[in-house]
Amino acid sequence: MTIGRLQGVVRIVGAGLIGTSIGLALSKLGISVVLDDSSPANIRLASDYGAGVAASAGDEPQLIIVCVPPDVTARVVAAELKAFPNAVITDVASVKSAILDELAATSADLKRYVGSHPMAGREKGGTSSGRADIFVGRPWVVAEHSEALGSSIKLVEELALDLGSTPVRMTPQAHDRAVALVSHVPQLVSSLLAGRLVGAPGVELAGQGLRDTVRIAASDPKLWVQILGANSAEVVSILDAYAEDLGRVISALKDVSKPGALATIDQTIASGNRGVGEIPGKHGSRNPQFSSYVVMIDDQPGALARLLTEIGEIGINVEDLKLEHSPGAPIGLVELQVVPSSGDKLTKELQTRGWRFA
Amino acid sequence: MTIGRLQGVVRIVGAGLIGTSIGLALSKLGISVVLDDSSPANIRLASDYGAGVAASAGDEPQLIIVCVPPDVTARVVAAELKAFPNAVITDVASVKSAILDELAATSADLKRYVGSHPMAGREKGGTSSGRADIFVGRPWVVAEHSEALGSSIKLVEELALDLGSTPVRMTPQAHDRAVALVSHVPQLVSSLLAGRLVGAPGVELAGQGLRDTVRIAASDPKLWVQILGANSAEVVSILDAYAEDLGRVISALKDVSKPGALATIDQTIASGNRGVGEIPGKHGSRNPQFSSYVVMIDDQPGALARLLTEIGEIGINVEDLKLEHSPGAPIGLVELQVVPSSGDKLTKELQTRGWRFA
């Protein structure tokens, strides 16, 4: 029984991380999913995980989702448009203008094509990394364009909603500009920083700040060559401005006694503060819509369970939780996040029961 | 009763985050700590938290730890050397050469001064953010210099060991070069990136990658002006190389059809991969010495408590725990970290009890 908005068969082409994850999520909703991939082993694996069944000759999909690398996406979309003349086709590549331009240069039926981009992923790629829940709560860009039928756009939005995402309509150009800012430029900035660590003395002093800043520098070069190559104009326009800002900082640091030099540094850090403040939703892994409390617990089996059992008895739901403890230390710290209206009750009741707050 | 290596009274000047944290940790070891600060309120607060007692006229400290902002550190160290002619003095500022140079230009008794730098901190500063355990397992640079007595260096190393840190002897110059690489340049790179977000459309698409990359951009401008101003030469030498790499990437992206352009992008990302690989220890916030398991739980009060109670009954200690759930979703994911030898038992016993692994 289908409990999602989508009706009919969904065909997924490419059973990597994103394709498999979509298949898992749709299958859970009772939607019929057929899987295709250039690798029969990927199809078998994704199918074993529960992401759908292998595609066969008689399939009549209503919606086709192309989840292949960016550089072959347009070609695969064009082939699917031809092979399935009644289906709406979307893709999930992280660049949108280049793919639409490539398709527009062919005789492809663009009424039935609407590109999209789920803003979701994991550090590990591949079929076996697929998870049904990676799209939940994330934006899913639906790249509307003038030739697409309204019904095609609507179907892709239904896909996004079925997977728990928030559909965001944008033109391919606006999308490419936005992801240059929030994804492609950060990737290069982080990779260039990490590149400076190669063979340099002192890396043994690295702390969490550096680790966070270069985390995404562990990403796959092959994928990024495709993405950056296909969105180079938007990336360059931001990188040029970044390089100009960097030049100003370097020139200030070259003579810090010069009038205005320290003000330049101050403004750079302060401007960064403002930029971080403009990122919506949770910062880091903490969510500002919740109130945060730190409770001390013994570092013993069962101590955290006792705490959470008592919080359950009090009737408060823990929205998020972070465990901080130093290996071998007798005390651990638990950071609890609860809705603000529960905060007073939480602290009062727990203190009455003998728990200590840090 | 003292159970640390240090004997005698320790005087801490400056009861901010680091000073208070050191006081808390030493006091726990039974070491007698006296606290001084230009703000009497800070002294009272730190003392209330258990970081030591207020300094008084007759104190005869064996070791003095100066924990004040970098720009006043040398002045305070010089005053302490004069006021306490039998004490060894260290400081914890995040730059070392400039402070030693400033002291060397006075008549200060450098035999008794050894600068140091605990590679520890928290995002929030201030007395009330102090925590005894922030130094555990972290490097603590002991900035040896030719005029310091061996016994002075040894005493500062004992301090680091008492707090659970690993003392690392380095010259002030080697220290400043290393922190430029692992801390000061990353700060600027992150701040400059975050600065590009100010007023830019598309920030609503931000994901975890951007959030991690700009997390440290939320840092205090006032503190960073001091740090960067005092270590400008080392920072510039790395930033110059970074700017050169950046220029090469921009020029490649300006014409991706040019021979070698995509190879430049590929090498940039690949070099970043290698740089990340050179960072020792745990990457991200996960600890590779533990095995990781993801269990699905209902998003209901008490569900996590039930899980942890059962893990306690099985007799397994949870080393770390991360809760991933999407607000409003009926299912949450709990990532549990346990010692590898407990992994099989954990999965088998929990599955027997009906828990599902993701």
Image (cartoon, coloured by chain):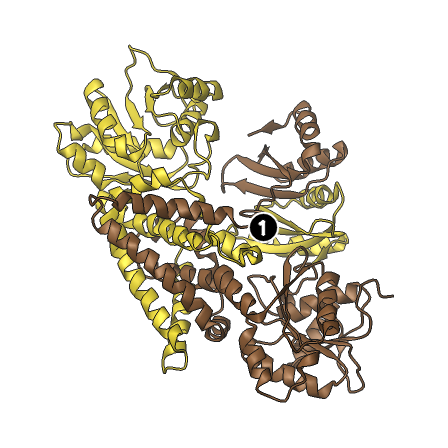
Chain colours: A yellow, B brown
Quadrant for the N terminus of chain A in the image: top left
| Figure label count | 1
The crowd level at tag 1 (other Cα within 10 Å; few <14, some 14-19, many 20+) is many
On screen, residue B225 above or below A175: below
The image shows residue A257 at horizontal and vertical percentages of 41, 82
Residue B125 vs residue A299: left or right?
left
Chain ID at mark 1 = A
Q: Residue at x 25, y 26 (%)?
A: A76
The image shows residue A255 at horizontal and vertical percentages of 39, 78
Closer to the camera, A61 or B230? B230
Q: Residue at x 45, y 36 (%)?
A: A134
Q: Secondary structure at mark 1?
A: strand
Residue A130 vs residue A202: left or right?
left
Q: Is residue B283 visible?
A: yes
Q: Residue at x 66, y 81 (%)?
A: B110
On screen, residue A119 above or below B101: above
The image shows residue B12 at horizontal and vertical percentages of 70, 75
Q: Residue at x 29, y 39 (%)?
A: A226
Residue at the limit of the structure toward the right, as seen here: B1
- The amino acid type, in three-letter code, at marker 1 is Val
Residue at the limit of the structure toward the top, as seen here: A58
Q: Which residue is mark 1?
A: A338
Residue at the limit of the structure toward the front, as seen here: B146
On screen, residue B50 above or below B347: below
Residue A11 vs residue A262: left or right?
left
The image shows residue A254 at horizontal and vertical percentages of 38, 74
Q: Is residue A215 visible?
A: no
